Image (spheres, coloured by chain):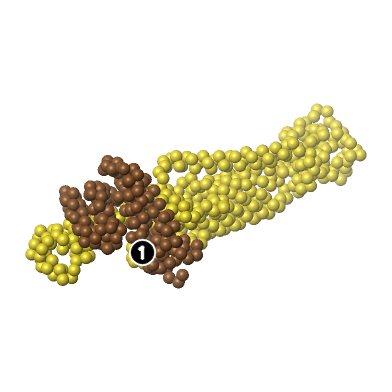
């Protein structure tokens, strides 16, 4: 490998994943470095409970590796990862038939996040969690996973226009919810 | 036209170029719209900040890579390693180290002392450590002549005391282990003409280490030819020492990521020393240990990253030790080491106790502080730790 793996495109990484054990391992490590944060953001936002979200996050990457070794994903890597994570989240919710109340959500923040950021994190998660499930998912995919409207539409099985509308609508609702704090947020 | 949608699309990066002009015109004339733009931008920035708090835990990273039988990335970032009380961690580490040291000491002491005490005769017959008094005239078995058939001579523990005899003293002197006695009834002794009393001396020897000496008679004859009897006992071949030791961290920055690997030799090492004399030694130390690192760096796109890693390094250092004995079986030493690993330099210093249950074996227990310095992207970082050092040494 002449170039740094961080310069590889998703397509090149997917090809490497199917190579030798060493290449495959290197490619997977790069994919993990690139997308772990985003997948974890999705799981945490959709599931709420940190422990359950962690289990789904782990399962997502393990299934991703097992799947891409035998079949080439039709979407981008992040799209494919989110699809797996979404299925796992839906299964989890269906099996548990649970409704997560705000009180039970674990909003623990890493120790190296500043106090101001902790408050901001709490507010954002609080607002997102008040949205309906469909909007919550679309917002998460758009703002945390950087997915295009087409990718969101494909993952959610909706039209791109619907995805766009849900994102706009969701952000407007978040702004309303955060209205009392919006001036503080503006400072950041 | 709904300018809120246009503002959203503009910030979202999806606004059509043809609609930008009408949005900018509207913004230039409406304070309310400009306020809406500020709020939307602020919210986008808040989302960006929020994303950084979703770093997966080290536990998850380890679980994924272990589950796929892959090497765990060294720089696995982590937010929440399994929480445990600092105090409990400290105490448990400390107890583990002490327990290991004591267990080692007890087992080795039992092995060396236990075997030796049950087999004294054999030990005495060892050529290196035994001495035969060739001044004994076995044909003239006179009880006035001291008889030391043989004795184990531990290294560096012979003390010779010379005491003058008054020239006109016609009395005999009896020497016991640690004092001189003057007898009231003199014993006649044949004195060679060539000698005068002024030249005579009492050679009283105190053996400090073991009770292996067997004096057949308490009478000690004053014979100047016996004077150098023990003078050749302090001949010691200091030679080489080989030490195998373990290390246990007791104070260091709390690691926020798991150890990167599980090597065969973890926190263990070998030290080879040449003993220039009984106090000063120098040599080479090779050890393998975990060193936690936390440093910043910038990636190719200019993003600032905080790296945390807990790799296992092999370090090679030059070692210098100075020590002295408190008594026959216990000594104190201090040492400094300077060397490096593949990524940086290592400085160590420490003090410790050397327990010598047997002359050629030592048990070591000390405290060891180290500073590891390394560079990343032209910035210099250091990490330090304090540890317990325990092991066993062999002298050749």
Q: Quadrant of residue A147?
A: bottom left
Toward the viewer: B138 or A61?
A61
The x and y percentages for residue B82 are: 41, 45
Q: Residue furthest right?
A: B139
Toward the viewer: B94 or A124?
A124
Q: Which residue is mark 1?
A: A74
Crowding at label 1, few (<14), some or many (≥20) Cα neighbours within 10 Å? few
Q: Residue furthest left?
A: B29
The x and y percentages for residue B354 are: 61, 45
The x and y percentages for residue B198 are: 79, 42
Seen in the picture, residue B300 relative to B357 is either above or below; the reply is below
The residue lying at 33 percent from left, 65 percent from top is B302
Q: Quadrant of residue B143?
A: top right
Which chain does yellow denote in the image?
Answer: B
Which chain does brown denote in the image?
Answer: A
The residue lying at 61 percent from left, 41 percent from top is B105
In what element is the residue under mark 1? loop
Which subunit holds the residue at mark 1?
A: A
């Amino acid at each position: 490998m002449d170039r740094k793996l961080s310069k590889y495109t998703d397509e090149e990484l997917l090809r490497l994943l199917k190579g030798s054990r060493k290449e495959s391992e290197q490619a997977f490590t790069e994919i993990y470095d690139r997308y772990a944060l985003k997948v974890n953001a999705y799981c945490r936002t959709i599931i709420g409970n940190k422990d359950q979200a962690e289990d789904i996050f782990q399962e997502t990457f393990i299934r991703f590796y097992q799947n891409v070794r035998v079949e080439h994903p039709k979407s981008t890597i992040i799209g494919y990862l989110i699809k797996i994570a979404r299925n796992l989240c839906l299964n989890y919710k269906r099996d548990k038939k649970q409704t997560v109340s705000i009180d039970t959500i674990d909003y623990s923040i890493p120790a190296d996040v500043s106090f101001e950021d902790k408050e901001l994190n709490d507010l954002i998660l609080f607002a997102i969690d008040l949205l309906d499930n469909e909007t919550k998912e679309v917002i998460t995919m758009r703002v945390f996973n950087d997915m295009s409207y087409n990718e969101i539409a494909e993952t959610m099985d909706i039209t791109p226009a619907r995805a766009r509308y849900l994102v706009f609508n969701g952000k407007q609702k978040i702004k309303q919810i955060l209205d009392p704090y919006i001036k503080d947020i503006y400072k950041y | 036209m709904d300018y809120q949608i246009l503002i959203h699309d503009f910030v979202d990066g999806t606004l059509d170029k043809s609609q930008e002009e009408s949005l900018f015109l509207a913004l230039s004339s409406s304070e309310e719209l400009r306020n809406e733009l500020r709020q939307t931008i602020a919210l986008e920035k808040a989302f960006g900040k929020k994303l950084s708090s979703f770093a997966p835990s080290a536990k998850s990273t380890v679980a994924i890579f272990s589950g796929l039988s892959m090497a765990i990335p060294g720089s696995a970032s982590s937010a929440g390693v399994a929480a445990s009380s600092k105090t409990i961690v400290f105490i448990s580490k400390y107890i583990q180290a002490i327990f290991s040291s004591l267990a080692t000491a007890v087992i080795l002491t039992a092995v060396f002392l236990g075997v030796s005490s049950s087999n004294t005769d054999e030990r005495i017959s060892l050529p290196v450590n035994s001495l035969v008094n060739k001044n004994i005239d076995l044909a003239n078995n006179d009880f006035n002549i001291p008889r030391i058939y043989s004795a184990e001579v531990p290294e560096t523990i012979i003390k010779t005391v010379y005491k003058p005899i008054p020239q006109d003293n016609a009395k005999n002197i009896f020497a016991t282990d640690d004092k001189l006695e003057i007898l009231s009834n003199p014993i006649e002794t044949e004195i060679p003409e060539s000698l005068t009393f002024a030249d005579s001396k009492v050679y009283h020897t105190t053996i400090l280490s073991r009770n292996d000496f067997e004096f057949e008679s308490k009478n000690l004859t004053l014979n100047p030819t016996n004077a150098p009897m023990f003078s050749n006992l302090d001949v010691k071949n200091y030679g080489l020492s080989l030490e195998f030791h373990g290390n246990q961290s007791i104070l260091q920055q709390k690691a926020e990521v798991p150890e990167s690997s599980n090597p065969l030799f973890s926190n263990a090492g070998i030290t080879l020393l040449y003993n220039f004399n009984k106090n000063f030694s120098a040599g080479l130390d090779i050890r393998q240990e975990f060193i936690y690192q936390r440093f910043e760096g910038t990636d190719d796109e200019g993003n600032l990253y905080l790296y945390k890693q807990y790799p296992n390094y092999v370090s090679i250092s030059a070692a210098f030790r100075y020590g002295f004995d408190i008594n026959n079986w216990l000594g104190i030493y201090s040492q400094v080491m300077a060397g490096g690993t593949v990524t940086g330099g290592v400085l160590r210093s420490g003090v410790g106790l050397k327990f010598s249950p047997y002359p050629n074996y030592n048990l070591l227990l000390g405290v060891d502080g180290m500073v590891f310095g390394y560079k990343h992207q032209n910035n210099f970082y250091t990490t330090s730790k304090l540890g317990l050092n325990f092991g066993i040494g062999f002298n050749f």
